[in-house]
Image (spheres, rainbow, N blue to C red):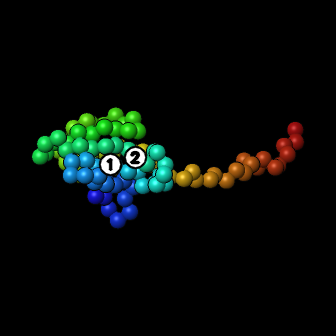
Amino acid sequence: MDLGPHPRFEAKQVNDLEWVVHDLTCDEGDPRRVIAHIWQADLDEYEVTWVRGLALDRWYHSVHSVLEDVVARMPNRTKPIPIPHRPPAGAHLAVAV
């Protein structure tokens, strides 16, 4: 289960009652890839254990609602954008007094 054509997160079903939420920006062997474990407690009740210290809810009504909350609340990780460093404009001009 994912959200969109290029999702950052996915919920992968482990068995009939358990899912794992992955951060797809992390490599397969990276322990930070696992964000949460989800267990179905009842027909419309899912318990979530957050692995990466997210302060999100513990109970949800669906696996999809867990993913929506993760997408809405996780900071967007992008590569740093290099900023060109140049001297201030006019710094090369000498001021004579």
Labelled pair 1, 2 in contact (Cβ < 8 Å): yes
Q: Is residue 81 above or below residue 5?
A: above
What amino acid type is highlighted by mark number 1? Val
SS class of the residue under badge 1?
strand
Q: Which residue is mark 2?
A: 34
Q: Could you tell me which quadrant the C terminus lies in?
A: top right
**Which residue is painted at 38% across and 63% down in the image?**
6
Check the image and report above or below for 54 versus 13. Answer: above
The x, y position of residue 53, in whole percent, is 39, 35
The residue at 31%/43% (across/down) is: 37
The image shows residue 88 at horizontal and vertical percentages of 72, 47
The image quarter in which residue 2 lies: bottom left
Q: Which residue is mark 1?
A: 20
Is 24 positioned to the left or the right of 56 in the image?
right
Q: Nearer the viewer, residue 1 or 5?
A: 1
The amino acid at mark 2 is Val
59 to the left or right of 6: left
